[in-house]
Amino acid sequence: MNNVLVIDDEKAVVSYDSELGMFRGEFLGLNGGADFYSDSVDGLIEEGRKSLAVFMQLCKEKGIEPRKNFSGRFNVRLSPKVHEAAVLAAAAANKSLNEWVAETINQAVHS
């Protein structure tokens, strides 16, 4: 995936903050904010490790589960035309809409 950095098995989205002139990383899937900044990729990795360690330690001290739990369910709102096109694409693939959407998302996140 583009703009994703893996640090100690946790994924962070990386962006560039033009006002600060620095890269910003933000861990996803955590139960709180754990972001970090640096002007280089190597520095970003180092700062990410520090930020993650502090976050995990605080969670441990407070008895908080550090990672979000995902149910595997979510609602998607589409325009009626896109909804229709998705139903047709699923039917053409001989799949339910749910199977087709799940497969399509799985392919997108693993490419």
Image (cartoon, rainbow, N blue to C red):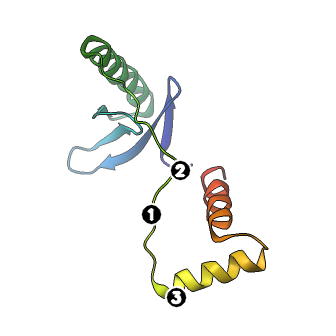
Q: Nearer the viewer, residue 43 or 14?
A: 14
- The picture places residue 83, in percent across and down from the top left corner, at 54, 81
**What's the distance in space between the residues labelled 1 and 2, CA to CA?**
25 Å
Residue 74 appears at what percent x and percent y?
A: 46, 57
Question: Contact (CB < 8 A) between labels 3 and 1?
Answer: no
Three-letter code, disc 3: Lys
Question: Mark 2 to mark 3: distance in Å?
Answer: 29 Å
Q: Nearer the viewer, residue 9 or 99?
A: 99
Q: Please state the horizontal and vertical placement of residue 106, each as a whole percent of the image.
A: 64, 54
Please, is residue 106 above or below residue 42 in the view? below
Mark 2 or 3: in front is 3
* Mark 1, residue position: 75
User: Residue 32, how many percent across, how many down?
Assistant: 28, 33
Q: Which residue is mark 2?
A: 2
Q: Which residue is mark 3?
A: 81
- The Cα atoms of the two marked residues, 3 and 1, are separated by 17 Å
